[in-house]
Image (cartoon, helix red, strand yellow):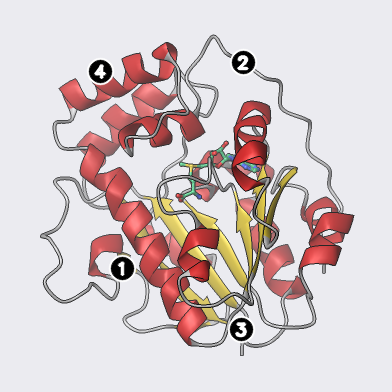
Amino acid sequence: MVDTRSAEPRAMDLTRPAAARIYDSFLGGSHNFGVDREVVERIGGELPGIGESYWENRAFLRRAVEFMLAHGVRQFLDLGSGIPTIGPVHEIARRRTREFRVVYVENEPLTVAHSRPLLAAEPNATIIHDDLRAPDSVLRTSQVRQFLDLDRPIGLLMSAVLHFVPDTDRPAELVEAYRDALAPGSHLLISHLTDSHDPAAMQVLTGFYMESSDPMHPRGTSVVEKFFGDFEQVPPGPALLSDWRPEPGARDRPTYALLHGGVARKP
Ligand SMILES: C[S@@+](CC[C@H](N)C(=O)[O-])C[C@H]1O[C@@H](n2cnc3c(N)ncnc32)[C@H](O)[C@@H]1O
């Protein structure tokens, strides 16, 4: 089943911080403004060491994409991709193969505008301006159809994005619509903010994002795990991101235990 809802287009807002640019700033990127850097500084003041959580997510994304590549996945649909710098999916893929395709999907207009020139010289990756809350639109858009063969396995990436979808937008049904559209052998990545481990820190972070154009909705780990439906979990199964297939000699856990996720395969 593919959901046929459409989502309201999102207006460009330069007066408030945006999730994509806050993330870029924490990663040390240059695609952010004073308003973003100001909130990043205040978040860091209240939650010293919080930058480790942004890196934790990015490192998990890399390990998970490398896992999928090692298991034959060559095409990726990255929902809520942010700005594709600092280790984006197409660069991870290119390190392994030239035979890959990546479609990035973003609903934030300036993030799309920042991304297009970065991808102009990259024939195997593109970005579409769309909203993951409209799976029918995303999956049927001509760029997705031209770039990806949905009859073959894909890597569906929902990395640090579902916590921007409120319960009123029925995230479980949205993820189900995407799961249903995938071919067997496809892999689903989810990373998600959780209030299960450190609710106090999570509350502080959520408060800061209330000032942004991207309010956050952290969820309990059991809710996040249900988003995988009946897909088969890649061992070790959903975990704190730094505990998901860590590399030998990897650093210790981040200061705050805020991110939960994993990878599962469609049988
Ligand atoms: C924290 S960033 C994560 C970037 C990247 N996925 C990663 O994990 O490294 C979340 C991104 O999701 C985007 N986003 C939020 N809600 C979205 C929606 N409904 N549809 C598409 N993109 C969305 C935001 O604009 C932001 O760029």
Q: CA distance from mark 4 to mark 3?
A: 41 Å
Query: Where is residue 26 drawn, in percent x and y?
Result: 32, 34
Q: Earlier in the sequence, mark 3 or mark 2?
A: 2
Q: Is mark 1 in CB contact (under 8 Å) with mark 4? A: no
Distance Cα–Cα, label 1 vs label 2: 35 Å
Above or below residue 150? Residue 221 is: above
- The single residue placed furthest to the front in the displayed view is 121
Tell me which amino acid carries mark 2.
Asp
Nearest to viewer (mark 1 / mark 4): 4
Q: Residues within 10 Å of mark 2 (few under 14, many from 20)?
A: few
At mark 1, the secondary structure is strand
Q: Is mark 3 within 8 Å of ligand 1?
A: no
The mark that comes first in sequence, 3 or 1, is 1
Distance from label 3 to label 1 (Cα)? 19 Å
Q: Which residue is mark 1?
A: 239
Name the kind of residue labelled 4 in the image.
Arg
Going from N to C along the chain, the mark reached first, 1 or 2, is 2
